[in-house]
Amino acid sequence: MSKPKQAVKGWQWALVLLAIMGHSIVAVAEEAPRAIDLFSAIGAQPATADRGGPEPSRILYPDQRLPLRFSHASHLRRDISCVTCHSQALTSTQAADSLLPREAACQSCHAIDHTQLFKKTDGPPAACYACHPGMPKAPTAQTPPAGPQLEALVPQVEIPPPYLKFNHQLHAKNQVPCATCHGDLSQVDLATRAQLPTMAQCLACHDQGLHGANQVPKLLRTTARKQGAPGRCATCHLMRADGTLQVQFPTGILRPSGNWRGDEHGLDFTRTHRLTAQSDPDYCSSCHRRDYCQQCHNGVLKPMDYHGGDYQTRHGLEARRNQLTCTSCHRQQTFCLGCHERLGVIHTATLPGSPSVSAFAPATSRRFHPDGWASPTPGPSHHAFEAQRNLRTCTSCHREQTCLDCHSALPGGRFLIGKSPHPADFVASGRCQATASRNPRMCLKCHREGSAELTCPN
Protein backbone atom coordinates (compact mmCIF):
# COMPACT_ATOMS: atom_id res chain seq x y z
CA MET A 1 0.00 0.00 0.00
CA SER A 2 1.47 3.31 -1.06
CA LYS A 3 2.15 6.05 1.43
CA PRO A 4 -0.15 9.08 1.44
CA LYS A 5 1.17 12.16 -0.32
CA GLN A 6 2.62 14.80 1.95
CA ALA A 7 2.31 18.55 1.55
CA VAL A 8 5.21 20.10 -0.31
CA LYS A 9 7.11 22.55 1.85
CA GLY A 10 8.27 25.97 0.74
CA TRP A 11 11.93 25.02 0.45
CA GLN A 12 10.95 21.97 -1.63
CA TRP A 13 9.10 24.21 -4.05
CA ALA A 14 12.24 26.31 -4.35
CA LEU A 15 14.28 23.26 -5.32
CA VAL A 16 11.65 22.27 -7.89
CA LEU A 17 11.80 25.76 -9.40
CA LEU A 18 15.58 25.59 -9.66
CA ALA A 19 15.41 22.16 -11.28
CA ILE A 20 12.88 23.34 -13.86
CA MET A 21 14.83 26.40 -14.81
CA GLY A 22 18.00 24.33 -15.14
CA HIS A 23 20.23 26.76 -13.31
CA SER A 24 22.11 26.69 -10.05
CA ILE A 25 22.44 29.55 -7.60
CA VAL A 26 25.64 31.38 -8.38
CA ALA A 27 25.10 34.63 -6.51
CA VAL A 28 22.36 36.31 -4.54
CA ALA A 29 23.16 39.78 -5.81
CA GLU A 30 23.05 40.44 -9.54
CA GLU A 31 26.53 41.00 -10.86
CA ALA A 32 27.69 43.07 -13.80
CA PRO A 33 27.97 41.20 -17.11
CA ARG A 34 31.29 39.53 -17.66
CA ALA A 35 32.93 37.55 -20.43
CA ILE A 36 31.74 33.97 -20.80
CA ASP A 37 33.69 31.09 -22.29
CA LEU A 38 31.03 29.61 -24.53
CA PHE A 39 32.73 26.40 -25.39
CA SER A 40 34.25 25.15 -22.18
CA ALA A 41 32.51 22.93 -19.67
CA ILE A 42 31.27 25.24 -16.92
CA GLY A 43 29.89 22.57 -14.61
CA ALA A 44 26.91 24.76 -13.74
CA GLN A 45 24.36 22.35 -15.13
CA PRO A 46 24.03 18.64 -14.43
CA ALA A 47 24.01 16.17 -17.27
CA THR A 48 20.74 16.08 -19.15
CA ALA A 49 20.17 12.47 -18.23
CA ASP A 50 20.18 13.48 -14.56
CA ARG A 51 17.93 16.55 -14.78
CA GLY A 52 14.86 14.64 -13.67
CA GLY A 53 12.52 16.70 -15.88
CA PRO A 54 10.71 15.76 -19.07
CA GLU A 55 12.83 14.51 -21.94
CA PRO A 56 13.11 16.52 -25.15
CA SER A 57 10.05 16.19 -27.35
CA ARG A 58 10.17 13.21 -29.68
CA ILE A 59 7.84 15.09 -32.02
CA LEU A 60 10.11 18.13 -32.40
CA TYR A 61 13.32 16.09 -32.17
CA PRO A 62 12.90 12.89 -34.24
CA ASP A 63 14.77 9.81 -33.08
CA GLN A 64 18.38 9.67 -34.13
CA ARG A 65 20.65 6.84 -35.23
CA LEU A 66 24.15 7.29 -33.81
CA PRO A 67 26.40 4.27 -34.49
CA LEU A 68 29.44 5.97 -32.95
CA ARG A 69 31.94 5.54 -30.15
CA PHE A 70 32.68 8.93 -28.63
CA SER A 71 33.15 10.46 -25.20
CA HIS A 72 32.53 14.15 -24.64
CA ALA A 73 33.70 13.72 -21.05
CA SER A 74 37.07 12.36 -22.20
CA HIS A 75 37.64 15.20 -24.66
CA LEU A 76 36.60 17.93 -22.20
CA ARG A 77 39.01 16.54 -19.58
CA ARG A 78 41.77 17.24 -22.09
CA ASP A 79 40.72 20.92 -22.30
CA ILE A 80 39.36 20.50 -25.82
CA SER A 81 36.71 23.19 -26.22
CA CYS A 82 33.41 22.73 -28.01
CA VAL A 83 34.41 25.04 -30.87
CA THR A 84 37.35 22.76 -31.74
CA CYS A 85 34.93 20.17 -33.09
CA HIS A 86 31.76 22.22 -33.60
CA SER A 87 33.11 25.29 -35.36
CA GLN A 88 29.95 25.47 -37.50
CA ALA A 89 27.99 26.58 -34.42
CA LEU A 90 29.53 30.06 -34.70
CA THR A 91 27.91 30.64 -38.10
CA SER A 92 24.83 28.38 -38.04
CA THR A 93 21.52 30.24 -38.32
CA GLN A 94 19.11 27.30 -38.86
CA ALA A 95 18.19 24.33 -36.73
CA ALA A 96 18.48 22.13 -39.81
CA ASP A 97 22.21 22.87 -40.14
CA SER A 98 24.41 19.84 -39.49
CA LEU A 99 26.87 20.61 -36.70
CA LEU A 100 28.32 17.11 -36.52
CA PRO A 101 32.13 17.32 -36.82
CA ARG A 102 33.57 16.22 -40.15
CA GLU A 103 36.56 13.98 -40.47
CA ALA A 104 38.80 16.99 -41.08
CA ALA A 105 38.11 18.21 -37.54
CA CYS A 106 39.03 14.81 -36.13
CA GLN A 107 42.25 14.65 -38.13
CA SER A 108 43.68 17.58 -36.18
CA CYS A 109 44.28 15.07 -33.34
CA HIS A 110 43.70 11.62 -34.88
CA ALA A 111 46.15 10.51 -37.57
CA ILE A 112 43.46 9.05 -39.83
CA ASP A 113 44.83 7.44 -43.00
CA HIS A 114 42.41 5.89 -45.51
CA THR A 115 45.21 3.69 -46.85
CA GLN A 116 45.88 2.23 -43.37
CA LEU A 117 42.43 1.77 -41.82
CA PHE A 118 43.65 -0.65 -39.12
CA LYS A 119 46.86 1.00 -38.02
CA LYS A 120 47.64 1.32 -34.33
CA THR A 121 49.04 4.51 -32.86
CA ASP A 122 50.61 5.48 -29.54
CA GLY A 123 48.52 8.65 -29.36
CA PRO A 124 44.84 9.17 -30.14
CA PRO A 125 43.46 6.13 -32.00
CA ALA A 126 43.24 6.37 -35.78
CA ALA A 127 41.76 2.99 -36.74
CA CYS A 128 38.17 3.03 -38.06
CA TYR A 129 36.81 0.66 -35.41
CA ALA A 130 37.84 3.11 -32.65
CA CYS A 131 34.88 5.35 -33.54
CA HIS A 132 32.72 3.25 -35.88
CA PRO A 133 31.19 0.10 -34.34
CA GLY A 134 30.71 -2.63 -36.91
CA MET A 135 34.09 -2.13 -38.48
CA PRO A 136 36.56 -5.01 -37.98
CA LYS A 137 39.47 -4.45 -35.62
CA ALA A 138 41.86 -6.31 -37.92
CA PRO A 139 41.70 -7.44 -41.55
CA THR A 140 40.61 -11.00 -42.35
CA ALA A 141 40.38 -13.04 -45.52
CA GLN A 142 36.84 -11.77 -46.06
CA THR A 143 37.69 -8.12 -45.43
CA PRO A 144 37.55 -6.03 -48.60
CA PRO A 145 40.65 -4.07 -49.49
CA ALA A 146 40.97 -0.44 -48.50
CA GLY A 147 38.64 1.59 -50.60
CA PRO A 148 34.93 2.25 -51.14
CA GLN A 149 33.87 -1.37 -50.45
CA LEU A 150 35.48 -1.37 -47.02
CA GLU A 151 34.29 2.11 -46.19
CA ALA A 152 30.75 1.03 -47.12
CA LEU A 153 30.78 -1.13 -43.99
CA VAL A 154 30.78 2.01 -41.84
CA PRO A 155 27.22 2.42 -40.48
CA GLN A 156 25.74 5.79 -41.35
CA VAL A 157 24.82 8.42 -38.78
CA GLU A 158 21.23 9.70 -39.09
CA ILE A 159 20.29 12.96 -37.33
CA PRO A 160 16.97 14.21 -38.73
CA PRO A 161 16.61 18.00 -38.55
CA PRO A 162 14.38 19.20 -35.70
CA TYR A 163 11.03 20.83 -36.39
CA LEU A 164 12.17 24.08 -34.79
CA LYS A 165 13.88 27.36 -35.56
CA PHE A 166 17.19 28.01 -33.84
CA ASN A 167 20.10 30.38 -34.44
CA HIS A 168 23.38 29.19 -32.91
CA GLN A 169 25.21 32.23 -34.20
CA LEU A 170 22.88 34.64 -32.42
CA HIS A 171 23.15 32.75 -29.12
CA ALA A 172 26.93 32.72 -29.37
CA LYS A 173 26.98 36.47 -29.96
CA ASN A 174 24.80 36.93 -26.87
CA GLN A 175 27.33 34.96 -24.79
CA VAL A 176 24.96 32.09 -24.00
CA PRO A 177 27.15 29.15 -22.89
CA CYS A 178 26.68 25.85 -24.70
CA ALA A 179 25.96 24.13 -21.38
CA THR A 180 22.90 26.34 -20.87
CA CYS A 181 21.07 24.40 -23.58
CA HIS A 182 23.00 21.12 -23.80
CA GLY A 183 23.91 20.48 -20.17
CA ASP A 184 27.29 19.71 -18.67
CA LEU A 185 28.79 17.33 -21.23
CA SER A 186 31.81 16.74 -19.01
CA GLN A 187 29.65 14.00 -17.43
CA VAL A 188 28.37 12.54 -20.72
CA ASP A 189 29.99 10.22 -23.24
CA LEU A 190 28.02 10.06 -26.48
CA ALA A 191 25.64 13.01 -26.71
CA THR A 192 22.21 12.04 -28.01
CA ARG A 193 18.85 13.73 -28.36
CA ALA A 194 18.72 13.62 -24.54
CA GLN A 195 21.22 16.49 -24.56
CA LEU A 196 18.96 18.71 -26.70
CA PRO A 197 17.19 21.59 -24.95
CA THR A 198 13.71 21.21 -23.48
CA MET A 199 11.04 23.88 -23.46
CA ALA A 200 11.72 24.49 -19.77
CA GLN A 201 15.29 25.49 -20.59
CA CYS A 202 14.19 27.77 -23.43
CA LEU A 203 11.60 29.55 -21.28
CA ALA A 204 14.23 30.28 -18.64
CA CYS A 205 15.41 33.01 -21.05
CA HIS A 206 12.60 33.41 -23.57
CA ASP A 207 9.96 34.73 -21.19
CA GLN A 208 9.57 38.29 -22.44
CA GLY A 209 5.86 39.11 -22.45
CA LEU A 210 4.86 35.88 -20.74
CA HIS A 211 2.70 35.90 -17.63
CA GLY A 212 4.70 35.73 -14.42
CA ALA A 213 7.99 36.57 -16.12
CA ASN A 214 8.84 39.24 -13.56
CA GLN A 215 8.30 36.78 -10.72
CA VAL A 216 11.38 34.72 -11.61
CA PRO A 217 14.20 35.52 -9.18
CA LYS A 218 16.92 37.77 -10.58
CA LEU A 219 19.62 35.32 -9.57
CA LEU A 220 18.24 32.84 -12.12
CA ARG A 221 18.41 35.24 -15.03
CA THR A 222 21.00 34.57 -17.71
CA THR A 223 22.64 37.16 -19.91
CA ALA A 224 20.06 36.47 -22.63
CA ARG A 225 17.25 37.16 -20.16
CA LYS A 226 18.74 40.48 -19.19
CA GLN A 227 18.85 41.43 -22.86
CA GLY A 228 15.18 40.53 -23.31
CA ALA A 229 14.94 37.25 -25.21
CA PRO A 230 11.57 37.22 -27.05
CA GLY A 231 8.82 35.03 -25.63
CA ARG A 232 6.71 34.67 -28.77
CA CYS A 233 5.94 31.08 -29.78
CA ALA A 234 6.99 31.84 -33.36
CA THR A 235 10.52 32.60 -32.13
CA CYS A 236 11.24 28.86 -31.98
CA HIS A 237 8.24 27.06 -33.48
CA LEU A 238 7.44 26.65 -37.15
CA MET A 239 4.49 28.62 -38.49
CA ARG A 240 1.77 27.84 -41.02
CA ALA A 241 0.61 30.11 -43.81
CA ASP A 242 -2.45 31.22 -41.81
CA GLY A 243 -0.28 32.59 -38.98
CA THR A 244 -0.80 29.75 -36.51
CA LEU A 245 1.76 27.29 -35.22
CA GLN A 246 2.45 24.12 -37.14
CA VAL A 247 1.44 21.28 -34.84
CA GLN A 248 1.17 18.30 -37.19
CA PHE A 249 4.42 16.58 -38.12
CA PRO A 250 5.37 13.14 -39.48
CA THR A 251 6.43 12.26 -35.92
CA GLY A 252 3.05 13.13 -34.37
CA ILE A 253 0.83 16.00 -33.27
CA LEU A 254 2.35 18.62 -30.99
CA ARG A 255 0.16 19.36 -27.97
CA PRO A 256 0.81 21.48 -24.85
CA SER A 257 2.17 19.55 -21.89
CA GLY A 258 0.17 21.49 -19.32
CA ASN A 259 3.26 22.25 -17.23
CA TRP A 260 3.05 26.01 -17.77
CA ARG A 261 -0.63 26.93 -18.05
CA GLY A 262 -2.56 23.85 -16.99
CA ASP A 263 -3.54 23.30 -20.61
CA GLU A 264 -2.69 19.64 -21.08
CA HIS A 265 -4.87 18.43 -23.94
CA GLY A 266 -5.95 15.24 -22.20
CA LEU A 267 -9.17 13.28 -22.47
CA ASP A 268 -11.09 15.77 -20.35
CA PHE A 269 -9.72 18.96 -21.93
CA THR A 270 -12.74 19.34 -24.20
CA ARG A 271 -14.86 19.88 -21.10
CA THR A 272 -12.37 21.93 -19.08
CA HIS A 273 -10.70 24.15 -21.69
CA ARG A 274 -13.03 27.05 -20.87
CA LEU A 275 -10.86 28.29 -17.99
CA THR A 276 -7.69 28.31 -20.10
CA ALA A 277 -9.46 30.02 -23.00
CA GLN A 278 -10.94 32.71 -20.75
CA SER A 279 -7.62 33.48 -19.06
CA ASP A 280 -5.76 34.16 -22.33
CA PRO A 281 -7.62 33.71 -25.64
CA ASP A 282 -4.57 34.93 -27.58
CA TYR A 283 -2.62 31.95 -26.27
CA CYS A 284 -5.17 29.55 -27.75
CA SER A 285 -5.15 31.44 -31.05
CA SER A 286 -1.45 30.63 -31.41
CA CYS A 287 -2.49 27.16 -32.61
CA HIS A 288 -6.24 27.39 -33.26
CA ARG A 289 -8.03 29.77 -35.59
CA ARG A 290 -11.42 31.17 -34.59
CA ASP A 291 -13.25 28.91 -37.05
CA TYR A 292 -11.77 25.91 -35.20
CA CYS A 293 -13.61 26.98 -32.05
CA GLN A 294 -16.79 27.75 -33.96
CA GLN A 295 -16.97 24.21 -35.33
CA CYS A 296 -18.27 23.15 -31.91
CA HIS A 297 -19.58 26.41 -30.46
CA ASN A 298 -21.95 27.21 -33.32
CA GLY A 299 -23.87 24.01 -32.60
CA VAL A 300 -23.53 22.58 -36.12
CA LEU A 301 -20.79 20.01 -35.58
CA LYS A 302 -21.28 17.47 -32.81
CA PRO A 303 -17.96 16.68 -31.10
CA MET A 304 -18.18 12.93 -30.58
CA ASP A 305 -15.56 12.90 -27.82
CA TYR A 306 -17.24 15.50 -25.58
CA HIS A 307 -19.49 13.09 -23.71
CA GLY A 308 -18.15 9.88 -22.24
CA GLY A 309 -19.07 6.39 -23.31
CA ASP A 310 -22.70 5.26 -22.93
CA TYR A 311 -23.73 8.84 -22.22
CA GLN A 312 -27.15 8.37 -23.79
CA THR A 313 -28.28 6.04 -21.03
CA ARG A 314 -27.27 8.45 -18.24
CA HIS A 315 -27.73 11.90 -19.78
CA GLY A 316 -31.10 12.30 -18.05
CA LEU A 317 -29.37 12.84 -14.70
CA GLU A 318 -27.33 15.79 -15.97
CA ALA A 319 -30.30 17.19 -17.89
CA ARG A 320 -32.38 17.33 -14.70
CA ARG A 321 -29.53 18.83 -12.72
CA ASN A 322 -28.68 21.71 -15.04
CA GLN A 323 -30.79 22.03 -18.14
CA LEU A 324 -29.10 25.29 -19.19
CA THR A 325 -25.82 23.45 -19.66
CA CYS A 326 -27.46 21.17 -22.23
CA THR A 327 -29.15 24.03 -24.08
CA SER A 328 -25.82 25.84 -24.54
CA CYS A 329 -25.13 23.31 -27.31
CA HIS A 330 -28.43 21.56 -28.02
CA ARG A 331 -31.79 23.00 -29.10
CA GLN A 332 -34.53 21.50 -27.01
CA GLN A 333 -37.23 21.36 -29.66
CA THR A 334 -35.16 20.01 -32.55
CA PHE A 335 -32.59 17.93 -30.70
CA CYS A 336 -33.93 16.79 -27.34
CA LEU A 337 -37.65 16.61 -28.06
CA GLY A 338 -37.10 15.32 -31.58
CA CYS A 339 -35.05 12.39 -30.26
CA HIS A 340 -37.57 11.63 -27.52
CA GLU A 341 -40.39 11.60 -30.07
CA ARG A 342 -38.51 9.27 -32.41
CA LEU A 343 -37.81 6.87 -29.55
CA GLY A 344 -41.30 7.14 -28.13
CA VAL A 345 -40.06 8.53 -24.81
CA ILE A 346 -42.93 11.02 -24.71
CA HIS A 347 -46.73 11.02 -24.66
CA THR A 348 -48.18 10.14 -28.06
CA ALA A 349 -50.61 13.08 -28.03
CA THR A 350 -47.84 15.44 -29.19
CA LEU A 351 -46.82 13.29 -32.15
CA PRO A 352 -48.05 14.06 -35.69
CA GLY A 353 -51.17 12.12 -36.53
CA SER A 354 -51.91 11.37 -32.89
CA PRO A 355 -55.54 11.04 -31.69
CA SER A 356 -57.43 14.25 -30.94
CA VAL A 357 -56.77 14.20 -27.23
CA SER A 358 -54.94 16.86 -25.25
CA ALA A 359 -51.47 16.21 -23.95
CA PHE A 360 -52.73 17.68 -20.67
CA ALA A 361 -55.37 14.99 -20.33
CA PRO A 362 -54.04 11.75 -21.87
CA ALA A 363 -56.47 9.02 -22.77
CA THR A 364 -54.75 6.51 -20.48
CA SER A 365 -54.66 6.31 -16.71
CA ARG A 366 -50.90 7.06 -16.67
CA ARG A 367 -51.17 10.80 -16.21
CA PHE A 368 -48.14 13.02 -15.70
CA HIS A 369 -50.00 16.23 -14.80
CA PRO A 370 -52.30 16.67 -11.76
CA ASP A 371 -56.06 17.28 -11.83
CA GLY A 372 -57.03 20.76 -12.97
CA TRP A 373 -53.86 21.14 -15.02
CA ALA A 374 -55.77 22.17 -18.19
CA SER A 375 -58.98 23.40 -16.54
CA PRO A 376 -60.69 26.43 -18.22
CA THR A 377 -60.73 28.02 -14.76
CA PRO A 378 -57.27 28.60 -13.26
CA GLY A 379 -56.67 26.78 -10.01
CA PRO A 380 -53.71 25.94 -7.74
CA SER A 381 -52.59 23.14 -10.09
CA HIS A 382 -53.11 25.02 -13.35
CA HIS A 383 -50.41 24.76 -16.01
CA ALA A 384 -50.24 28.54 -16.49
CA PHE A 385 -48.29 29.01 -13.27
CA GLU A 386 -45.68 26.42 -14.23
CA ALA A 387 -45.38 27.79 -17.78
CA GLN A 388 -44.79 31.32 -16.49
CA ARG A 389 -42.23 30.14 -13.96
CA ASN A 390 -40.13 27.85 -16.22
CA LEU A 391 -41.29 27.42 -19.79
CA ARG A 392 -38.24 25.25 -20.53
CA THR A 393 -39.77 22.49 -18.45
CA CYS A 394 -42.83 22.51 -20.72
CA THR A 395 -40.84 22.57 -23.95
CA SER A 396 -38.87 19.51 -22.92
CA CYS A 397 -41.98 17.45 -23.75
CA HIS A 398 -44.31 19.70 -25.76
CA ARG A 399 -43.93 21.46 -29.06
CA GLU A 400 -45.36 24.90 -29.82
CA GLN A 401 -48.39 23.35 -31.50
CA THR A 402 -49.55 21.92 -28.15
CA CYS A 403 -49.98 25.47 -26.84
CA LEU A 404 -51.53 26.81 -30.05
CA ASP A 405 -54.27 24.16 -30.01
CA CYS A 406 -55.89 26.05 -27.16
CA HIS A 407 -54.44 29.56 -27.17
CA SER A 408 -54.56 30.50 -30.86
CA ALA A 409 -57.34 32.71 -32.22
CA LEU A 410 -56.75 31.34 -35.71
CA PRO A 411 -58.85 28.52 -37.16
CA GLY A 412 -57.31 25.12 -37.58
CA GLY A 413 -56.63 24.20 -33.96
CA ARG A 414 -57.90 20.96 -32.52
CA PHE A 415 -60.04 22.52 -29.80
CA LEU A 416 -61.00 26.01 -31.11
CA ILE A 417 -60.98 27.47 -27.59
CA GLY A 418 -59.03 30.61 -28.38
CA LYS A 419 -58.09 31.07 -24.72
CA SER A 420 -55.99 34.24 -24.42
CA PRO A 421 -52.69 33.67 -22.59
CA HIS A 422 -52.28 37.39 -21.91
CA PRO A 423 -53.05 38.97 -18.51
CA ALA A 424 -56.01 41.35 -18.12
CA ASP A 425 -53.83 44.49 -18.30
CA PHE A 426 -51.76 43.31 -21.27
CA VAL A 427 -52.93 46.14 -23.55
CA ALA A 428 -53.29 48.97 -21.01
CA SER A 429 -49.88 48.34 -19.46
CA GLY A 430 -48.10 48.81 -22.77
CA ARG A 431 -46.77 45.26 -22.89
CA CYS A 432 -48.79 44.59 -26.03
CA GLN A 433 -47.10 47.43 -27.89
CA ALA A 434 -43.66 46.51 -26.56
CA THR A 435 -44.02 42.87 -27.60
CA ALA A 436 -45.34 43.74 -31.06
CA SER A 437 -42.56 46.25 -31.75
CA ARG A 438 -39.89 43.78 -30.65
CA ASN A 439 -41.04 40.78 -32.72
CA PRO A 440 -44.34 41.14 -34.62
CA ARG A 441 -43.98 37.68 -36.15
CA MET A 442 -44.58 36.15 -32.74
CA CYS A 443 -48.05 37.79 -32.63
CA LEU A 444 -48.96 36.21 -35.98
CA LYS A 445 -48.73 32.78 -34.35
CA CYS A 446 -52.19 33.37 -32.85
CA HIS A 447 -53.67 36.45 -34.60
CA ARG A 448 -54.61 36.97 -38.23
CA GLU A 449 -52.76 39.79 -39.98
CA GLY A 450 -54.93 42.92 -40.07
CA SER A 451 -57.06 41.93 -37.09
CA ALA A 452 -57.89 44.47 -34.37
CA GLU A 453 -55.86 42.53 -31.81
CA LEU A 454 -52.63 43.39 -33.67
CA THR A 455 -53.19 47.13 -33.35
CA CYS A 456 -52.78 47.04 -29.55
CA PRO A 457 -55.71 49.51 -29.01
CA ASN A 458 -55.65 51.60 -25.84
Image (cartoon, helix red, strand yellow):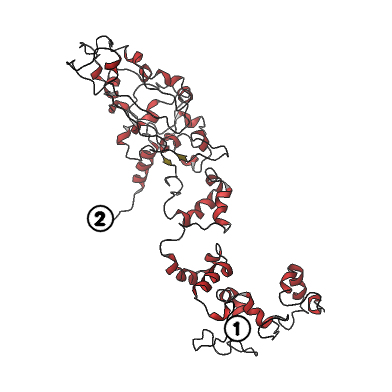
The residue furthest left is: 141
Mark 2–mark 1 Cα distance, whole angstroms, equals: 58 Å
Q: Earlier in the sequence, mark 2 or mark 1?
A: 2
User: What mark, if any, has residue 3 been given in the picture?
Assistant: 2
Q: Residue at x 53, y 42 (%)?
A: 286
* Residue 139 screen position, x and y as percent: 19, 15
Query: Nearest the camera: 171 or 70?
Result: 70
* Relative to 121, residue 444 above or below: below
Q: Which mark is residue 158?
A: none
Quadrant of the image occupied by residue 413: bottom right
* Screen quadrant of the C terminus: bottom right
Q: Which residue is mark 1?
A: 383
Callout 1 secondary element: helix
- State the residue at coordinates (41%, 64%): 310
Q: What is the secondary structure assignment of the residue under circle 2?
A: loop
x, y percent for residue 58: 38, 38
Please name the amino acid that badge 1 sits on. Answer: His
Q: Quadrant of residue 35?
A: top left
Q: Is residue 373 above or below residue 316?
A: below
Residue closest to the eye, 367 or 230: 367
